[in-house]
Image (cartoon, rainbow, N blue to C red):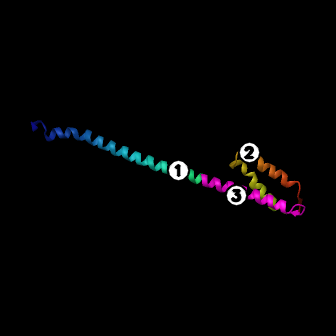
Amino acid sequence: MAEWITIESTKAFAGPIATVIASIVAAIFADTQACVARAQKNVAYDKLKLDTFEKRYGIYRDARELIEHVTVGRGVTTDANFIRQHYVSLDKARFFFDREIQSLLEKIRREVVFPIRWK
């Protein structure tokens, strides 16, 4: 019965078997690459969220400092450079906040300018 299995007949199957094994290895490699790409995407997204938070917090901090500076020093001469630096920070808000927060920060900018006397 085993007479039909010869070395010549096994050579005939070697090519297709090698192709199947190579395709399985390629599929495993592609799946590994997809997992690495997903992990990199998640890391980049987390970094973007952290960077955005830091920028937003900086704008919040500058708005708070500006309000404190003006309310504590109301009626007193105010430093124009301090106000200008914080205005620049509040202007950056349009890139990091939605329209509602932008309008609040714009209101802060308008309210802060008029009641102060400049050096």
Judging depth in this view, the residue of 107 and 81 nearest the camera is: 107
Q: How many marks?
A: 3
**The quadrant where residue 73 appears:** bottom right
Image depth: mark 3 or mark 2 in front: 2
Distance between mark 3 and mark 2 Cα atoms: 18 Å
- Residue span colored magenta: 49-78
Give the position of the C terminus as an image quadrant.
bottom right
Disc on res. 12: none
Judged from the image, the secondary structure of the residue bearing numbered disc 1 is: helix
Find out whether residue 7 is within the magenta segment: no
Secondary structure beneath label 3 = helix
**Point 50% across, 51% down: residue:** 40
Give the quadrant of residue 24: top left
User: What residue is rendered at 44% in x and 48% in y?
Assistant: 35
Label 2: few (<14), some or many (≥20) within 10 Å?
Answer: few
Q: Residue 100 — which label?
A: 2
Is residue 103 toward the left or the right of residue 43 in the image? right
Amino acid found under the numbered disc labelled 3: Gly
Q: Which mark is residue 58?
A: 3
How far from the left and from the top, in percent, is residue 18? 27, 43
Which picture quadrant has residue 8?
top left
Q: Residue at x 79, y 59 (%)?
A: 66
Residue under label 1, please give it.
42
Residue 111 point in image, percent of width and height: 84, 52
Locate residue 82, reporting x and y percent.
80, 62
